Image (spheres, grey):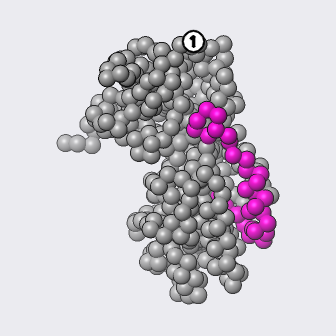
Amino acid sequence: MVFNSSIRYVDGSLRIDDVAVAAIAREVGTPTYVYSLKRIGANYERLREAFAPLAGQIHYSVKANGSLAVLRSLAAAGAGFDCVSAGEIDRCVRAGARAEDIVFAGVGKTRAEIAFAVSQGIGWFNVENLAELSYINNAAAAMGADAVKVALRLNPQVTANTHPYMATGHGAAKFGLTADAVGEILTRTSDFSRLDFAGIHLHVGSQLGDTAATLTALDAALELVAGHPRVRTINLGGGLPVAYRFGDEQPSLGGLVSQLDSRLRGYEVLLEPGRSIVADAGVLVAEVLYVKRQAGQVFTIIDASMSELVRPALYDAHHEVAPLRKTIGETVRAQVAGPVCESADVLARDRQLPRLQAGDRVALLTAGAYGMSMASNYNARPRPAEVVVSESGAEWRVSRRRESFDDLARFEK
Ligand SMILES: *Cc1c(COP(=O)(O)O)cnc(C)c1O
């Protein structure tokens, strides 16, 4: 059974590229995240090629997975980066990214973060508040920086077809500026002598079920900037969907690109995909601790929880469960739950799974995005180790060791 070009069963054993996941779990223990750098590179290339007709740059959205090993690999492949905090900018710089390939987005940038970003000489600010423009302008003046590029983030007041927590472009969302505000700012750009108002930014949501909201938002943006020839760049944000369920189709990018192409002639196009680059390149490996039959149900309790992977609890997200050793035969309807003291700590609900026993190991698939980057220490659980399988697919290494109890106590006195 093949899940994607890197993650599949070979002779009944789950592999990531050339490496048996069971071999990693034996040495590193569980729970552990494992990422295929080969698959991440292939996903990046697939997007780069599909969007090549629009001739823009791809800025990988760091919040999806900010592992330094992942960032280094993408920087080496030529990717730019979309950051939503100074901490993320710092990680990108550490990973070898060029400052001009970094964009800084976010609805609540502090003045300290803005000063840090200007001092680093980053490529773009995606701006979401009028006052933010003054802060950036002042920071630039203080540091002698000129022509700092800003893209005004338009809230197009469209509701994307996705989970409510992943929709960001509707009128009630905190994100972006209204069309009126954008229009007004574009008539008074001379108030901000250090800024180059070269772009418009859109990001209508994540895991978008269709392209309608994106195209509606884009049309609104193009109408707004029609009289402003300085705006040469349209940043379309992220949100490209990922196949989380067996049988889900990976959406074709060709259709979207051709719909965009006809509208975007003459503009530079930027993209900020996160999930679509890293999600299906990562798994969370866990061990079955107990199998409990109770109230007519089978609870499979594993050693991973909502602390390591919060998406099911937060978004009712679906992650397929694959045993590291493929079993055939009888299956059973089960709840795969973690040890954390919350009823929401169920990682897979009502799944038809092979009969698992204590000691068996499983992988939660498509966990490379918004997994480790959203992990917490809730219930005083040390965050898991991270392992990367190399770009060649042949080697693996621990890229972040498992946290210890000392790590958990380190900042307290
Ligand atoms: C989260 C986010 C992204 C990335 O979204 P994905 O669904 O992971 O592609 C891109 N741009 C902005 C502004 C974001 O907030």
246 displayed left or right of 321: right
The amino acid type, in three-letter code, at marker 1 is Gly
Helix, strand or loop for disc 1? loop
334 displayed left or right of 343: right
User: In the displayed image of the protein, which residue is found farthest to the front?
Assistant: 296
Q: Nearer the viewer, residue 338 or 158?
A: 158
Residue plotted at (57% across, 12% down): 329
The stretch drawn in magenta includes residue 253: yes
Q: Is mark 1 within 8 Å of ligand 1?
A: no
Q: Position of residue 33 (x, y in %)?
A: 49, 31
Q: Quadrant of residue 145?
A: bottom right
Q: Nearer the viewer, residue 263 or 388?
A: 263
Q: Position of residue 67 (x, y in %)?
A: 51, 41
Q: Quadrant of residue 59?
A: bottom right
What segment is highlighted magenta in the picture? 243-271
Residue plotted at (52% across, 47% down): 64
Q: Is residue 97 above or below residue 286?
A: below
Q: Quadrant of residue 397?
A: top right
| Quadrant the N terminus occupies | top right
State the residue position of label 1.
329
Residue plotted at (69% across, 57% down): 57
375 displayed left or right of 367: left
Q: Position of residue 251 (x, y in %)?
A: 69, 46
The reply to whether residue 289 is visible in this rendering is no
The stretch drawn in magenta includes residue 367: no
Q: Is residue 13 above or below residue 131?
A: above
